[in-house]
Structures are given as C-alpha cells and as structure tokens.
Amino acid sequence: MISEQEFNQLNRILEQQTGIRLARHKCDIMASRLANRLRVTGSESYAQYYRLILSEQGTAELNKFIDKMTTHETYFFREMSQFEFLCTYLKDKPPTRSPVRAWSAAASTGEEAYSIAMILEDLFYNRSWHVYGTDISQTAISMAQEACFAMSTVSKVPTKFKKAYCLKGFGIHEGSFSVAKQIKEGCTFNVDNLLALKTVDYSFDIIFLRNILIYFDEAKQLEILNNVVKRLNHAGLLFLGHSEALRYKRDDLEMLKPCIYKKIAP
Ligand SMILES: C[S@@+](CC[C@H](N)C(=O)[O-])C[C@H]1O[C@@H](n2cnc3c(N)ncnc32)[C@H](O)[C@@H]1O
C-alpha cells in the first residue's frame, strides 16, 4: 500500500521531472508500477524509495522512476493514414530546404522516427534528410538508438518498406530485426524534455507530436505546443495523435485534416 503522503511526494517529483501530474485515483497504478523498483533497490517503503531517488546516488534510479511512470506504447506506422497523408503531401510539395528535417518529439523507443525515416529515404534517396527523435525517458532513447525490434512488430511495416529497410536478425539476434544502415544513420536520438528543451536547436519541415499531450493539463499542453510550433518551419507539417486535435483555432496553424496542421505564420 502507498500512503497519501508517499503518493504526493512521488507525484511531485514526477511533475518536476516530466510535467505530468497523476490524479489521486491513480495511486494504485503508481504503487504497482513501482513495486518492482522497490524490490530491486531494496527499498522497504515508498518513502524510502522517494529518499533514494532524491539522493545523489539515486540519479540512475530517478531515470528508472521516470521510465516506469511514463507510458511508452508505440509501434511502426501507428495511425497509418497519417503516414499515407505525409507520403502523398511530400510527393506533391517536397520541402525546398536541405536537408529535409523531421522531428519525432515524443519518440519513445524509436518506431515513429524510423517509420518517418523510411518514407523520407523512399522519397528523397537522392537528397539529404534527417530525423531527430527526443523523449524524456533515457531507457526508451537507448532502445531507439539500438534499433533492435521484436520480429513480431515488423508486421506493421508496409511490405515495400519491410523488404527494403528491415533486416532479420540471426544467431543471438534471432527473433528480432534491425533497420537498414541508411535508415539508422539518418536518425539521431536524444533525451529531452518538451517543457524545457535543451537539444533542439534547428527547425523542422515535419513534426510528429503524437500521443503525448493527453498526459498533461491544459496549461502544459499549450506550453508544449508553443515550444514545438516555434521549431516548425513556415509551411511545415505538424501531426498530433488522433485524440489530441486542437480544441481552438491558432493563428499560426491551418488544419489540413483532423490532427494534421500546416504552419502558416512565423
Ligand atoms: C505514448 S508514447 C508516444 C510515442 C509515439 N509518439 C507514438 O505516438 O507512438 C509517449 C512518450 O512521451 C514521453 N514523455 C512524457 N513526458 C515527456 C516530456 N515532458 N518530454 C518529452 N517526452 C515525454 C514518454 O516517455 C513516452 O515515451
């Protein structure tokens, strides 16, 4: 059992680190997500675990805490219709800047960034392109950098891209696949916080900000959106998750389709 005080203490750290604040009724979820970390670290209570992640020796465990308390669900070509739209749009109106730059702004373990990369390589193999992926979770970013995925997840990749860019693992990599060299080399990943960005110092033609805003209150959603839209080039495209459509009109964004926007003002 987690006490109200322990829940509040851990929730405060979560909010300081990520901007996410859990509602009181989520205390059982917090307790069960952290139960294994208490075992692994030998903490006898949530209060002791709280003291550990606050301590100087607790930095690595603080990363594990963030990782446990955030949701990383993702898969290749999630919401396929958005990727189809991207493909058609880029064929018709290819960005003029070079390299073509895309950002997967809550990249999780990398599947979204590599999906975008496959599209860019397919369309712009004779041009330079780059996909940047950021996420607050160090564990997720390490997995994205490794680019080794369970074979069971390859079914989401369209056949044409599967044949061209997915490499079946052998020996110790049996049961997994990696992405081709040109896809992996076109992608860079870094830990970063969308509420306090430190590593994103250029602007993008394409930004995916999907399945992330739902975890924040309205004020933080706006802060994140402003941080992201600021880094979108004029005429660049912004993709939001299917349940995250803007509830109000912004002067700097034109809606092309539900959850897909074009930047129209600086
Ligand atoms: C559900 S995943 C979304 C993955 C991908 N965009 C997709 O739609 O499939 C949400 C990700 O947001 C990350 N996240 C949570 N808070 C964040 C923050 N403040 N800054 C950056 N990333 C954050 C989590 O670590 C998690 O990997």
Image: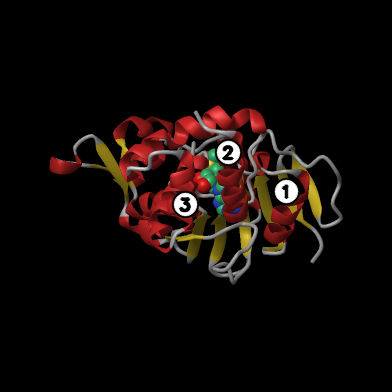
In the image, 243 versus 3, the foreground residue is 3
At label 2, counting other C-alpha atoms closer than 10 Å, the crowd grade (few under 14, some 14-19, many 20 or more) is many
Res. 221 mark = 1
State whether residue 116 is above or below residue 191: above
| Residue visible at 47% across and 52% down in the picture | 51
- Is 117 on the left-hand or right-hand side of 169? right
Q: Which residue is mark 3?
A: 51
Circles 1 and 3: CB atoms closer than 8 Å: no
- Where residue 155 appears, as percent x and y from the top left, is 38, 30
The mark closer to the camera, 1 or 3, is: 3
The mark closer to the camera, 1 or 2, is: 2
- Is 150 on the left-hand or right-hand side of 234? left
| Residue visible at 68% across and 51% down in the picture | 238
- Where residue 55 appears, as percent x and y from the top left, is 44, 59
At mark 2, the secondary structure is helix
Q: Which residue is mark 2?
A: 7
In the image, 259 versus 223, the foreground residue is 223
Q: Amino acid at mark 1?
A: Gln
In the image, 94 versus 61, the foreground residue is 61
Q: Amino acid at mark 3?
A: Arg
- Where residue 95 appears, as percent x and y from the top left, is 63, 61
- Is 24 on the left-hand or right-hand side of 135? right
Is residue 94 shown to the viewer in this render? no
Distance Cα–Cα, label 2 vs label 3 = 13 Å
- Comes first in the chain, label 1 or label 2: 2
Distance Cα–Cα, label 1 vs label 3 = 30 Å
- Comes first in the chain, label 1 or label 3: 3
| Residue visible at 80% across and 50% down in the picture | 254
- Is 142 on the left-hand or right-hand side of 112? left
At mark 3, the secondary structure is helix
Rendering colour mode:
secondary structure
Circles 1 and 2: CB atoms closer than 8 Å: no
